[in-house]
Amino acid sequence: MFNSIRGILSAKGSEAVFLLSGDIEWEITMPANDIQDLPLNNECRIFTWLYHREDQMKMYGFFNERRRSTFLELLKVEGIGPKGAVKIMGGISQEDLERALEAGDLARLESVPGLGKKTAQKMLLSLKGKLVSAQDSVVSPYNDLVQALADMGYDRRSAAEALAKAEKSVGNVKLPDVEREKLLFKEAIVYLSGQ
């Protein structure tokens, strides 16, 4: 519904900011470290996600799209709701979170305020390989297929490598683009299943 809101940052709190956009001042809940990066009384763009329930509506905001994607991935972990995800993101930098998940560093995750051992373990199981930073991401001509495989639970790097192997095995077979992608997808799953 809302992708982002642009306006003047009129106030900052510990858990939310107020953004004046036209005649509307939005209250947007944000991770603490995202709030620190925003300049007060200046124009800024906040990427948003709307939480809407029968009894409540709340706008969550993020410094950039990558941060919002991290938030949405955290929501997929059992036991983490929007409030918990914002607290986790406010207690650890994006780079540290990605590093801890990739390395399986349970101790680092447990050190995040409000994150217990069980939830940290669930995060490791659910998110390893899903939060890949821009500089670490594997470039693939089939980014949509990599994303589809990641959505199925495969590690992004492994998915990209499997697609590269599938590309070699398919070779120069002449097929329409859609058929070629289907074939590569099937071949990649075969490679990933054999690991």
Image (spheres, helix red, strand yellow):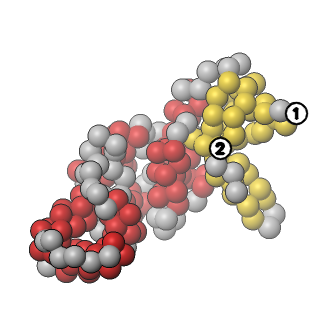
Position above or below: 101 against 54: above
Which image quadrant for residue 154? Answer: bottom left
Residue 177 locus on image (x, y percent): 33, 72
Mark 1 residue element: loop
Name the residue: 73% across, 51% down.
58
Identify the mark at residue 154; answer none if there is no mark.
Answer: none
Dot 2 or dot 1: first in sequence order is 2
Identify the mark at residue 23; answer none if there is no mark.
Answer: 1
Residue 111 horizontal side relative to residue 22, left or right: left
The disc labelled 1 sits on which kind of residue?
Asp
Residue 157 locus on image (x, y percent): 24, 58
Which image quadrant for residue 81? Answer: bottom right
Task: Spot the residue most to the top.
Answer: 41
Name the residue: 25% across, 51% down.
138
Residue 20 locus on image (x, y percent): 78, 31
Q: Nearer the viewer, residue 37 or 8?
A: 8
The 10 Å Cα crowd at callout 1, few under 14, some 14 to 19, many 20 or more, is few
Mark 2 residue element: strand
Residue 152 locus on image (x, y percent): 37, 73
Q: Is residue 61 something one can see in this rendering?
A: no
Name the residue: 25% across, 65% down.
159
Name the residue: 64% across, 49% down.
3
Identify the mark at residue 4; answer none if there is no mark.
Answer: 2
Position above or below: 125 against 8: below
Q: Nearer the viewer, residue 129 or 82?
A: 129
Residue 2 horizontal side relative to residue 174, left or right: right
